[in-house]
Amino acid sequence: MRRRVVSLVPSLTEAVALSAPGALVGVTDWCTHPGDLGDAVRVGGTKNPDVRAIAELRPDLVVANEEENRAPDLAALRAAGLEVLVTEVRDLPQAFRELDRVLVGALGLARPGWLADAEAAWARVEPPRELRPAFVPVWRRPWMVLGRDTFAGDLLARLGVRNVYAGHPERYPRVPAAELAAAGCELVVLPDEPYRFTADDGPEAFPDIPAALVDGRMLTWYGPSLAEAPAVLAAALRGQA
């Protein structure tokens, strides 16, 4: 097993921390789960990691993601002589494959029980009979929404929500609020990250469209939260404001 790991992705930080306690020596400022990360050093953000600080930790492996981390930073880490594993996650099956690649393939761990629990939880989700058209903002000022090929969009589709911007050429397009309001949607899904939408910040922009406030970790993280995500997200979507 790899003994010294730096994670530049909050999802993978949680996955490694629960699967290999004590292996993490470096994490980002955005890594919040689990609450106790021991002596792991904070090495900056996902978009601006401190390459020198990471190199000084002498990790056996740095785990990253092609969307969350910048290619120049990953190149700099490799130039410093570090091994960097870069994941790509665009849908749920790919998330499970990548978690296996990191935990079992790269770290040499036995397959963790939580990963099997997560697969079982999603396998129990019945295919929806119909999909409610919706848009999913991830930022405000300017408004940005989920577009094509997103992990969160795939999860929502499995729970009966059709992202009307899933065919957009961009993955996170900027769309004016007036255009969103006129898109003919039955629902607006508002996660609490990366932008922290709340009952008072988001729904008021679309007064004629029911809003569902959802846990951003459950919607966008691929890790141990996947075991709870189907039930938590389904409940939030049912309890729309």
Image (cartoon, rainbow, N blue to C red):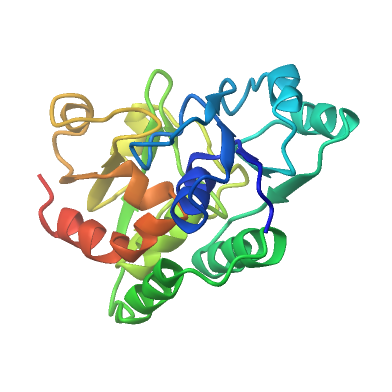
Q: In which quarter of the image is the C terminus?
A: top left
Camera-nearest residue between 170 and 230: 230
In the foreground, 225 or 188: 225
Q: Where is residue 147 in the image (x, y as percent from the top left)?
A: 51, 46
| Residue under the point 75% across and 32% down | 58
Please provide percent x and percent y for residue 219. Answer: 36, 51
Q: In which quarter of the image is residue 232?
A: bottom left
Classify the position of the N terminus by image quarter. Answer: bottom right
Q: Residue at x 52, y 54 (%)?
A: 20
Q: Is residue 23 above or below residue 237?
A: above
Q: In which quarter of the image is residue 119?
A: bottom left
- The residue depicted at 23 percent of the width and 50 percent of the height is 187
In the image, residue 113 lies at what x, y percent?
A: 42, 72
Residue at the spot 17% in from the left edge and 53% down from the top edge: 236
Please, is residue 193 above or below residue 117 in the view?
above
Residue 208 in sight in this render: yes
Q: Is residue 177 left or right of residue 152?
A: left
Rendered view: 74 above or below 86: above
Against 84, residue 199 (above or below) is: above
In this picture, residue 24 sits left or right of residue 88: left
Task: Choose top left, top right, bottom left or bottom right for residue 27.
Answer: top right
Front in this rendered view, residue 190 or 1: 1
Return the x and y of residue 218 as percentages of the image width and height. 33, 51
Using the image as rendered, state which of residue 20 and residue 126 is in the foreground: 20
Horizontally, is 110 left or right of 72 in the view?
left
